[in-house]
Amino acid sequence: SGFVVGLWLELLFSRHPPYGAARYPEAGPAALIAGATVASAGGASTAVLSGSVLVGWTVGWIGMHSIGVARRLNARLVADPGALGGSPTELGRRHLACLGFDATRAAALVATLLVPAVLGVRVLAELDVGTAASASSTSLLAAVGIAGLTGVGARALGARRNGWPIVLGGAGVGAVLAWWLG
């Protein structure tokens, strides 16, 4: 179950490669919290998997915004060359302070969101309906995932035209595969 949730999160986050000063979802706390929600709910039902992916995606985006705050603080800590006095030791100390702040930020994100996320997914697990609806939901989830994967692949390969026809084609292929597998 954790592998499936990790796969879905990777699919969602792969559209945002983490390089440069780009804004991208933070995958570390997101994966930790999503994995904890699956483990806590004790099953691999569609509701649990969908809820865990949604929780992970949300935590990733909240983490992205908290990284923006951290970047502004980091810039203030190392941007004033006069305060550094030309000392490499002082620059190293400030760099370590930035790393410590980032670790504290990520830990606070997990500490704040872990319990509500686990409780929310457990509620979804209790509301999960019978196997027929669950199989139908799984097929829909597979179709949407394949469509998303097609769109992410098209963007990653540098497609310059409007990507909606590719996504819709992926959704069609995903729906056929989901029907066939379901």
Image: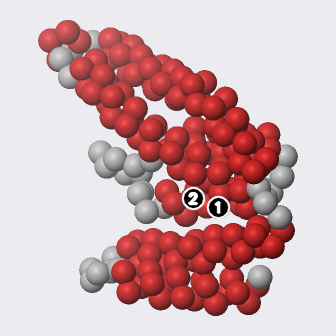
> Mark 1 = which residue?
7
Which color mode does the image show?
Answer: secondary structure
22 on left or right of 113: left
Q: Is residue 69 visible?
A: yes
x and y percentages locating residue 146 in the rendered image: 57, 77
Residue 175 falls in image quadrant: bottom right
Residue 10: mark: 2
Q: How many marks?
A: 2
Query: Could you classify mark 2 by the number of other residues whose Cα lies within 10 Å: few (under 14), some (14-19), or many (20 or more)?
Result: some
SS of the residue at dot 1? helix
Image quadrant occupied by the C terminus: bottom right
- Measuring 79% from the left and 47% from the top, which residue is drawn there? 126
Image quadrant occupied by the N terminus: bottom right
- Measuring 59% from the left and 45% from the top, which residue is drawn there? 55
- State whether residue 88 is above or below residue 44: above
x and y percentages locating residue 98 in the rendered image: 40, 22
Amino acid at pointer 1: Leu
SS of the residue at dot 2? helix
- State whether residue 137 is above or below residue 93: below
Q: Nearer the viewer, residue 106 or 143?
A: 143
Q: Report, in whole angstroms, how far the alpha carbon at label 2 lies from the one at label 1.
A: 5 Å
- Report if the CB atoms under discs 2 and 1 are less than 8 Å apart: yes
- Measuring 60% from the left and 24% from the top, which residue is drawn there? 111
Q: Nearer the viewer, residue 16 or 125?
A: 125
Amino acid at pointer 2: Glu
- State whether residue 37 is above or below residue 155: above
